[in-house]
Amino acid sequence: MSPTDPVDASVVLSARGLTKSFGSNTVLRGIDLDVRRGQVVALIGPSGSGKTTVLRSLNGLEVPDGGTVSFGGTGTFGGAGAAGRAGAGTPLALDFGATVGKRGIAALRDRSAMVFQHYNLFPHMTVLKNVTEGPVQVQKRPKADAEADALRLLARVGLADKRDAYPFQLSGGQQQRVGIVRALALKPQLLLFDEPTSALDPELVGEVLAVIKELAEEGWTMVIVTHELGFARHVADEVVFMDGGIVVERGPAADVLGAPQQERTKQFVKRIQ
Ligand code: ADP
């Protein structure tokens, strides 16, 4: 697209040339990523290829050394069909080659919500408090509204009766469903999942994947780091294969997973299936 073209309103996220090193370890070597509204993008690749670092960079949990991240201004906050969140609809563009500052990072964090591999729930808070903490403390939404939203979302994932439970009283699958609800309650433009099922016992994986699949069908925009290639093939619109801090191959899920072009992708897909 040339600079004079109208901004494509369907683009939620556009990242260009992301680089990141930890000391002498260069982890991202120029990553580009585009995500359109309602699209599900799966990030796959061997352990250590930089997938989690990409995700964390999109959410301001890591600050890239260089590159840009922009969020579109017209994407629905809170997913298709959900009640939106006021005052968050302006475009955002950050250039990590320049100083981004705390306000830039805070603005970036406001755009997306992360679901973590190890759930990262607050152990000393009830389920309800875990879900309402961000909306009330960070987004300054009225407590009664946040609680009503939280209870509606908990009911959706079959956990209404766990509102007063503490994380240690829940199974891993239940904790992760709370983790997902906590992310949804923030009404983000983009949901980020970091290997959401890899810490779960095999019999609990299905219940979490089912919730993610429903969210995809509802039109939420998401980026998912996953080793579940069967799931990625079912749910993702686009698959991005990373290795050694670069994107080796990307395209429709059926192409990248079913008929990969690059040798490294072929090896990876063959090994993991
Ligand atoms: P993946 O998600 O593909 O397994 P990661 O993004 O987690 O890859 O990690 C890529 C590389 O970056 C690994 O070598 C990892 O050890 C390193 N790394 C990730 N986070 C940090 C950190 N906070 N400090 C130092 N090294 C890190």
Image (tube, rainbow, N blue to C red):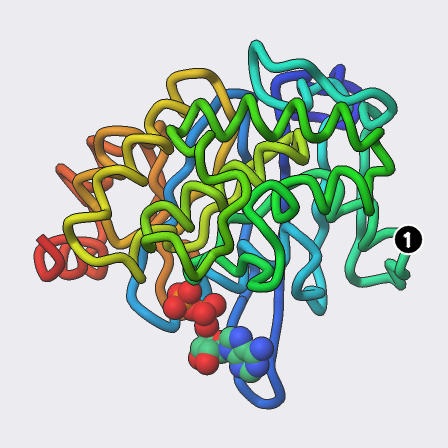
In the image, taking residue 208 as reference, residue 272 lies left or right, namely left
- The amino acid sitting under disc 1 is Arg
From the top left corner, tell me how far across and down residue 234 is, in percent: 22, 29
Query: Is residue 49 visible to us here?
Result: no
Q: To which quarter of the image does residue 140 belong?
A: top right
From the top left corner, tell me how far across and down residue 128 is, in percent: 60, 41
Query: Is residue 56 visible to us here?
Result: yes
Q: Is residue 1 above or below residue 103?
A: above
From the top left corner, tell me how far across and down residue 84 is, in percent: 71, 17
Q: To which quarter of the image does residue 117 belong?
A: bottom left
Ligand 1 within 8 A of label 1's CB?
no
Residue toward you, 122 or 42: 122
Q: Residues within 10 Å of mark 1 (few under 14, many from 20)?
A: few
The residue furthest bottom is 24
Rendered residue at 38%/51% (across/down): 196
Rendered residue at 71%/65% (across/down): 63
Helix, strand or loop under label 1: helix
> Can you identify the residue that label 1 sits on?
103
